[in-house]
Amino acid sequence: MPERRLRPALYELIALVGKALGNGKRLELVDLLVQRPYAVVELAQAAGLNVTTTSAHLQTLKHAGLVSTTRDGTTIRYRIASDAVAALYGQLLTVASTQMAEVDAAARRYLGPDDTEEISRDELLRRVSAGQAIVVDVRPSSEYEAAHIPKAVSIPMDELESRLSELPPDQEIVVYCRGVYCSFSHDAVRLLNAHGFHATRLADGILEWQLAGQPLSSPIR
């Protein structure tokens, strides 16, 4: 039947999405792009790649329909193509974690010892509503400006130690960053606790917050 002959071509096209995501560096770029749009040069800097390599990875992602571009004067900015792409990335993280024990082991090595207290999204909302905690976004300020949890204050991780005086010493501080595998929140809790603050972290991050349909200050994309 003609339809049977056409089926392989259909699945080869679908496989382009899997192939585009089948590279660790491209996943790192997606992880950054779900936070905000980036120009190639600043994305390369954030990912620790050279511009040529970053451009090549972005073209692969664009060919698979995962990212799109907009022009800002002479600058081309890349962004996640749709909410469906962010959801696919979030689901990929979940499947990898639940189906491969090696992923959790690698995460523990990367994030450090399990010595920080975490709370759920619902618990964060409850504590903030009850006036029991303040929320601190420790991502870079440009990502905070793109979108953040309502009422969160921005203190990027690399500024946190020098800005401790801005935080109330007698109130719980809940920090969050990009996602479940973002190290900023772990490092921030350790630093704050070492300086006598009562600090906890959101169990995941802004990606999972958005995918759960929780309110944001503005759309991420």
Image (spheres, rainbow, N blue to C red):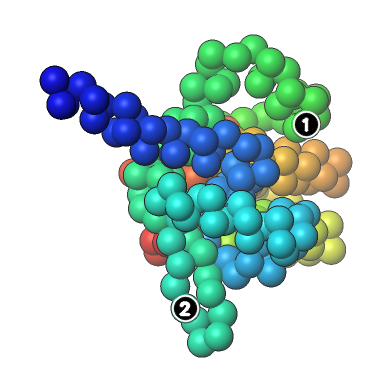
Q: Which one is nearer the viewer's eye here, 188 or 5?
A: 5
Q: Quadrant of the C terminus?
A: bottom left
Q: What type is the residue that disc 1 sits on?
A: Tyr
The quarter of the picture where residue 162 lies is bottom right
Tell me the crowding category of disc 1: few under 14, some 14 to 19, or many 20 or more residues within 10 angstroms, Cα based. few
Q: Residues within 10 Å of mark 2 (few under 14, many from 20)?
A: few
- Report whether residue 122 is seen: no
Location of residue 140 with respect to 112 vertically, above or below:
below
Residue 71 tag number: 2
When the figure is inspected, residue 8 is found, relative to residue 60, above or below; the finding is above
Q: Secondary structure at mark 1?
A: helix
> How many labels were placed on the picture?
2
Quadrant housing residue 211: top left
Work out how far the residue at label 2 is from the one at label 1, CA to CA, in angstroms.
Answer: 36 Å
Q: Residue placed at 16% from the left, 26% from the top?
A: 3
Whole-percent x, y for residue 107 in the image: 71, 26
The residue where tag 1 is placed is: 110
Query: Which of the image's four quarters has the N terminus?
Result: top left
Q: Write the residue at 53% across / 74% down.
A: 76
Q: Nearer the viewer, residue 3 or 130?
A: 3
| Label 2 SS | strand
Residue 19, above or below 103: below
Dot label at residue 137: none
- Could you tell me residue 117's position as x and y percent? 67, 29
